[in-house]
Image (cartoon, rainbow, N blue to C red):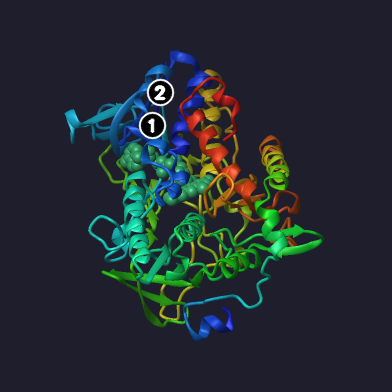
Amino acid sequence: MSEIAKQSPVITHYPDAPVPTRFTRWNRQNPVLQFGKFVMACINIMMMVIKGHEK
Amino acid sequence: MARIVILGAGVSGHTAALHLRRLLGRKHDITVVTPNSKWNWIPSNIWVGVGRMTAKQVTFDLPPIYRRKGIRYVQALGRTIRPHGDGDDPTPTVEVESTAPDSLGELSRLPYDYLINATGPKLRFEATEGLGPEGGHSVSVCTDGHAVHAAEALAESIAKMQAGEQQKLVVGMGHGTCTCEGAAFEYTFNVEHELTQAGVRDKAELIYLTNEVELGDFGVDGMVFRQKGYQQSSRMWTESLFTERGVHSILGAHVSKVDPGVIHYETLDGQHHTQDFDFAMLLPPFGGVGLTAYDRDGSDITDTMFAPSGFMKVDADYTPKPYEEWRAEDWPKTYEVPGYPNVFAVGIAFAPPHQISKPHVSANGTPIAPAPPRTGMPSGVMGKAVAITIADRVKGDPQAPAEQASMAKMGAACVASSGTGLLKGSAASMTMFPVVPNYEKYPDSGGRNFSGTRGEIGLHGHWIKLMLHYLFIYKAKALPGWQFIPE
Ligand SMILES: Cc1cc2nc3c(=O)[nH]c(=O)nc-3n(C[C@H](O)[C@H](O)[C@H](O)COP(=O)(O)OP(=O)(O)OC[C@H]3O[C@@H](n4cnc5c(N)ncnc54)[C@H](O)[C@@H]3O)c2cc1C
């Protein structure tokens, strides 16, 4: 457990965690870029389903 | 003519029923026993719980679907299994107790050739004093009814903030052995999104209280991804999101009691704490639904067929062993109950051999560790696999080998909503392969295959979650082409 957790059970932030830049946040909500990611994610899920189980 | 009885019409039982009907045609008798006449797409309860969907949008009536498909529907609770019959009659039966308004409480026996236990979880609110919406002091989103109540409580809290009051909102796990951390995570961020939309984010302290030892564990021992040439973990990813959205967290916690406005909990270091709240959504631990079993001579064989948790024992390796000796191979493959090859347990109803996350106990000996999740996708896959096994045996060789669907060999997609809205929504979409990590096969990548284990946050995740909502409800209604929609 982190140092912060030892001092107080309520952790208010994680100092080592990377926080997204404004550009990343904009990317995450940009409908055009996100549409591309949507298509890729659907293909990824479908591939997993088609490949089925590991033999 | 074969008689197949399915207990439970949730994700796994309903999937099994539809596939059995498709594979066997109408010559054989398929009966579904379930206490509730409505089917509920549980993952969307999260949106009901923040007032963004109605209960009607996440449920539909089952009897018309079963009438159309020629499946017999019995509104009842499965109670007792007699796998070798009773007295002079060796026919296996299951005793059911009616929950239909016109025959409430009446007992009857259904004979079967094959039985599928797909009864899901008992929501064990009673495990923590004061937990839950029925007689307790916290809300839940486990059923559509609970979620409607949660949305009302959240709206009240938001109204108070709009009137200038500060509020403390706690979302998480109501016991140290809970599962479904993903659902609590989703609800946390949907609440956060609603607070922002309502313009009251600065009036709220939002705390995620969990039994996970670190964020991003989700009861599956976390995930390792490869992104932009680097290894990243679900822990880093989740800590980043919590920091970005200003959500506080309490880790490794076992809630022991909920008083009005106060949560009592213990942390791994053995210390006891309290957390005051104005609104608390805490999930209950899960257990088996309390089925019993008797042999033909009347002797109680419940302990033979069920684990102490109430979940049904299947073809898993239940030998108690230390964490270091846990193997992916311990997990069941066919879901047949040992000694009873015509009885199966799928979805949440089967007893997992052990946790997936590393188990922990507090300094006082209290177990604090997520129970293994059995999410929608694996539950559906198991339901279909068992339907294929039974259909093969009914149509051909009664000894035909069983279809396999081990969680240690299948992948799963998990889309954790972090706010709704066609343009403002977002979700963390994750895929993992396999669900149960295999540290021998994938020693350097957290027990999973990098090419099947990915994670991404963004608007597209919300679209996927919304698409799955409509697709799975379409499939569950058995509308044309339903069988082409994967589990
Ligand atoms: C709030 C919440 C959010 C979730 N979100 C997601 C998500 O986003 N993605 C995901 O993959 N999974 C999610 N899950 C998990 C998912 O809901 C489960 O994996 C899935 O429902 C398990 O299917 P099941 O068939 O085993 O059980 P259930 O779907 O719970 O079905 C059990 C059925 O058995 C019936 N039953 C109960 N007792 C008896 C009895 N004695 N006799 C006969 N029938 C009985 C019940 O009424 C029900 O019809 C979520 C769970 C929760 C609680």
Q: Check whether the beta carbons of the residues at disc 2 and disc 1 lie within 8 A of each other.
A: yes
Q: What is the number of callouts on the image? A: 2
Q: Quadrant of the N terminus of chain B?
A: top left
| Image-based side of B177 in relation to A55, left or right | left
Q: Nearer the viewer, mark 2 or mark 1?
A: 1
Let me know if marks 2 and 1 both belong to one chain: yes
- Earlier residue among tags 2 and 1: 1
Residue B375 image position (x, y, % from top left): 52, 47
Is residue B429 positioned above or below B472 on the image?
below
In this view, the residue in front, B143 or B78, is B143
Is residue B2 positioned above or below B197 on the image?
above
Give the amino acid type for the residue marked by disc 2 in the picture: Ile
The residue pinned by badge 2 equals B65
User: What's the CA distance linking mark 2 and mark 1?
Assistant: 9 Å
* Residue at position x 33%, y 64% in the image: B160
Q: Chain of mark 2?
A: B
The secondary element bearing badge 1 is classed as strand
Give the amino acid type for the residue marked by disc 1 in the picture: Phe
| Image-based side of B34 in relation to B217, left or right | left
